Image (cartoon, helix red, strand yellow):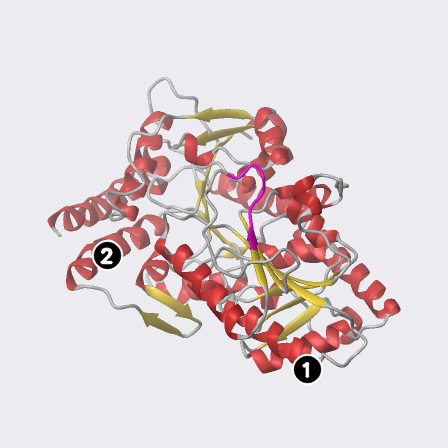
Amino acid sequence: MKICMAALSDLSLTLQSAFNDEVILSSFTLHTMIPTDVLLRQRMASSRLIIFALLFPRSLKGKLHILFAHARQLHLTLHLLAPWAPQYDVYFVDQLSTCVPFLRFFGRAPVVFYCHFPDKLLAEGEFVEGNLRRGRTSLLKRIYRYPMDWFEEVTTRQADVILSNSKFTARVFKSYFTSIKQTPTTVYPGINISAYEQEFDTSKPDIAAIVSDQLTLLSLNRFEKKKNIALAVESFAQLRQATQTTKLGTIRLVLGGGYDPRLEDNVQTLSSLVALTIAHTLTFNVITPSTSSIQLPHFDGACSNADILFLLNFSDEQRTALLTAPSTRVLLYTPSNEHFGIVPVEAMCCGLPVLACDSGGPTESIVDAPPAEKTGWLRPPDADKWARSLSEILALSEEERVQLNRRAKRRARDVFGMETMASQLEVALEEAVTIGPPSLRIVWMSLCVLLLALVIAVKF
C-alpha cells in the first residue's frame, strides 16, 4: 500500500513505522515543523520525508491564521498533484481538511481524515460539551468566520474515512457538523513508551535544577488562560494549609509548560499565576533550561528553594525526569473539556497517578472506578475537591502506589501505545482503499459544491 501523508507530526511517523518504506511524509512548512524531540528527529531521519518551503506566513499581524493555513495546505496539494508526482493508493490528512476534496478528486485516490477538533469551535470560544461559550467577537470576524466554517464542513465531508482523537471529539463532531452523516471512528493518539524509559543524569545542571527529595506535585501545560493552571495553585495552597501539622513533610508544586514571550496570553497567564502564588504567601522561582533562548521575565521575590517552581519550555529530558522521579506523587491536569490530552497518558506511561477534570478526553484515558482498575482521580474543577483528592493521593500506602503504578503503565501500553494506534490506522487505511476512487459523477458534483463555498468565501 502506497500512502501519502499530507502533514508532518508524530502521528505521521507512527504510521510510517507501521508501514516501513511504503509511507511518504510530506510537509508544507519548513522551520515551524522541525521538532525538538530527539526521538522524533531520529524517526524523521529514517523516513522518506519531503519538506516543501513555506510560501505563506502563519498570520498577518496576528490575524487571518486560518486563511493562511488553508493557503499553506493548498500549496502542498499543488506539489502532490503535479504531473511528475508519484501516484498513491490512499492519502492520509491530519488536522486541516482543506486539501481533502482536491486530493480525492484530482489525485483519484481515497482520503482518510484525522480530526483533532473542529476549527470552528476552537475559533468561536470555549467549548463545553452541549454548550459553546462564545467569546466577544466583532461583526467583521463573524462575517470572516462564516465562510471559513462552512468551507471546513464541506471539505471534511469529502473524506472517505473520518477518524477522531477521542470519543468526546467524535460526539462534538456529530453535533456541529450536521451535514456529515458519517460518524468518526475513534483512534487514540499513541505515545512512544520507550521515550519515557530512558535514564537521566542528575548531575546535569538542567536536571539538578528541577529534581528534589521533596514530595512533588506536577503540572505540565502551556501557560495559557484556558488551561486553568490557577486550579493547581489554589488546590496546592489549600493542601499546604491543611497539612501543615501532618507528617507528610515539605511539599512543592512544579508548573512546567510552553511559554512564548511574544504571546500576550502566555505573558498574562504567567504573571497572574505568580501573583496568585504571592497572594497565598507561597514562595516561587521561575527558570528555563540552559538551552532556552527566551529571556526570563523578572519577578520580585523569586527564591531558589521555592514552594512553587515555574519551569518554562522544559526539555524532553526534564519532562521525563519529573515524571519518573521517586518524589513525584501525582500529575495535576487542570484543563476542562480537553479534546484528548496526551499529558495524562504520558504520566500513566511512567506509572504516575493523574488528577484531572471530569470532562472531555481525560474521562476516556483515566480510569477512576472501579478501584481494581483505578489509574487516577476525575473531579470537578473545584479547588476544595482537588485539595481533598490530593490529600487522599499523598496518603496512599507504598503497596497501593505500587499497584496503581502497574495499572497505569499497563493501560498506557495496551490502549495508547504506538502499536495499538498503528494497527487501528492500518484498518482505516485498508477500508479506504477498499472503497476505491470516487466516480467521475460524484467528483464533479462535489467540485461544484466546493466551488460554491469558495465563491462565498471570496465574496465575504
- Report the magenta residues as a range: 286-292
What's the amino acid at mark 2?
A: Arg
Q: Residue furthest right?
A: 399
Instruction: Report if residue 154 lies within the magenta region.
Output: no
Classified by dominant secondary structure, the portion drawn in magenta counts as loop
Q: Which numbered mark, 1 or 2, is in the foreground of this view?
A: 1
Displayed quadrant of residue 74? top left
Q: Residue furthest top?
A: 84
- Residue 21 at x, y percent in the picture: 60, 25
Q: Nearer the viewer, residue 90 or 115?
A: 115
Q: Is residue 360 left or right of residue 60?
A: right
The residue under label 1 is 242
The residue under label 2 is 145
Residue 123 visible in the shown view:
yes
Displayed quadrant of residue 55? top left
Q: Nearer the viewer, residue 9 or 254?
A: 254
Residue pictured at 52% horizontal, 70% vertical: 278
- Residue 400 at x, y percent in the picture: 84, 70
Q: Is residue 67 left or right of residue 429?
A: left
- Residue 375 at x, y percent in the picture: 72, 66
Relative to 95, is 334 above or below?
below
**Distance between the alpha carbons at the discs numbered 1 and 2:** 48 Å
